[in-house]
Amino acid sequence: MATTMGSDPSASTVEPAVSMEATYRKIALRLIPFLALLFLLAWIDRVNVGFAKLQMLDDLQFSEAVYGLGAGIFFIGYFLFEVPSNLLLEKIGARRTLARIAILWGLTSMAMAYVTTPGQFYLARFFLGVFEAGFFPGVILYLTYWFPARRRASINGLFMTSFAVAGVIGGPLAGLIMSGMEGVGRFTSWQWLFLIEGAPSVLAGIAALYYLPEKPANAKWLSEAQKRAVAAALEEENQAAGKHSSLKAAFANPRVWLCAAIYFCIVSGNATIAFWSTSIIKEFGIDSTLQIGLLSSIPFILGTGAMLWSGFHSDRTGERRMHCACATALAGLGLFLTGVCLGSSLAALCALSLSAIGILAAFPVFWSLPAAFLTGTAAAGGIALVNSVGNLAGFAAPYLMGSLKTASGSFASGLYAVATLQIIATVLVLVFVRREK
């Protein structure tokens, strides 16, 4: 899988008066903060069930296996509707697609407050996945309308820091809500968590309709010269040899399926730390939801820094393969050591942080791989396919962790299994991803 890096294609096509650095900086400042905010809200609404679990399971008499299945079934809905959503985005535009997604996932997250049975829990999580489907690959596709390939690892890193930041603020925020809203009104603390954290997504979805331009040609804040320069740079890149533009070509391309396999392994680690880190920390003997939330933010603080460094360093050096392989190897080591060190709270937290550093550092570099050989409809379908197949690990990993925890009484065996998947990702990258020229 080649990710050929060369000079900026804009160099030979832009007007002399246009500074491409200033233009791309302006685009990034306009788009990335809002897109990152949307992803932050999506991630909080996706994983706040991990914090609600601390009280919800006792209130509703759910087992760890029921929780694991419910947490993971989100990704079945996500898998089934992601490719159609991304193809629809290409037809009707990003603005309406992202607005629709945010409004519906916010309403569904709020509806989680009314769950009382395992069946309702599974159904609500399934539809949360259905409605969020297409958001992440939609944004990855949307960014290809604005930025050339040589800038995407750092741009993807900036965008994807939002789910790392969600891990930083999500834990303390959930702990604060659950401790502060205990006994308020007729809702329990975990019900208030879903209601309070779902509402901002609805408002952000409405705001997307008015804020996001479809493409550079629609951006009123770019000059005509800047619009032409960006369009010319992207057009030249999309005509490059080796790029696939049809949906059929994307689905038939073995590199797309290789990317999906690698991403499956990476996501299994991310889902594990997202849905189970609070439970692992609770095993340290900590009962306060606020303290658990604060401690759970530590791995994500370190992972956020690693994600930013990985994206920027990969863009600066033009190297993708070893950045991705080293990150997944580090993730595997961290998860394995977490299982070994479960008896020691400090050592286990350090190992969990190591795994978060590796997992989060892999994301921005990984997403530079499929965008390097896909364009047009192939990019819409191919990126969605990689993300949807890869995110099946979001179903498999939580279910595996919950089942093994119920059967063995320990998180260790599940952590070892997910660590093995990170090593498999490392091997796939090293063996099958070609070195950059």
Image (spheres, helix red, strand yellow):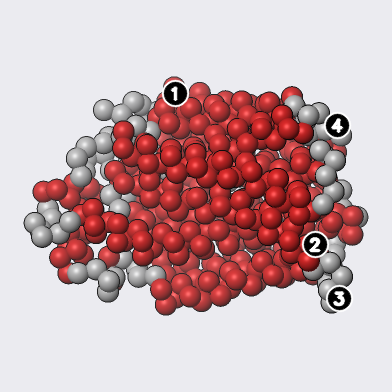
Residue 239: give its label.
none
Q: Are marks 1 and 2 in contact (CB under 8 Å)?
A: no
User: Which quadrant holds residue 285?
Assistant: top right
Question: Residue at point 79% right, 68% down?
Answer: 181
Name the amino acid, label 2. Answer: Ser
| Residue under label 4 | 408
- CA separation in Å, label 4 and label 2: 31 Å
| Residue under label 2 | 179
User: Which quadrant holds residue 279?
Assistant: top right
Residue 430: give its label.
1
> In x, y percent, where is residue 334?
63, 29
- CA separation in Å, label 1 and label 2: 46 Å
Residue 274 visible at all: no
Question: Mark 4 or mark 3, which has the lower sequence index?
Answer: 3
> In x, y percent, where is residue 201?
58, 69
Judged by depth in the image, the label closer to the viewer, 2 or 3, is 2
Q: Residues within 10 Å of mark 2 (few under 14, many from 20)?
A: some
| Residue under label 3 | 186
Q: Residues within 10 Å of mark 1 (few under 14, many from 20)?
A: some
Question: Residue at point 84% right, 67% down?
Answer: 182
Q: Are marks 4 and 1 in contact (CB under 8 Å)?
A: no
Looking at the rendering, in which quadrant would you find the N terminus? Answer: top left
> In x, y percent, where is residue 335?
66, 30
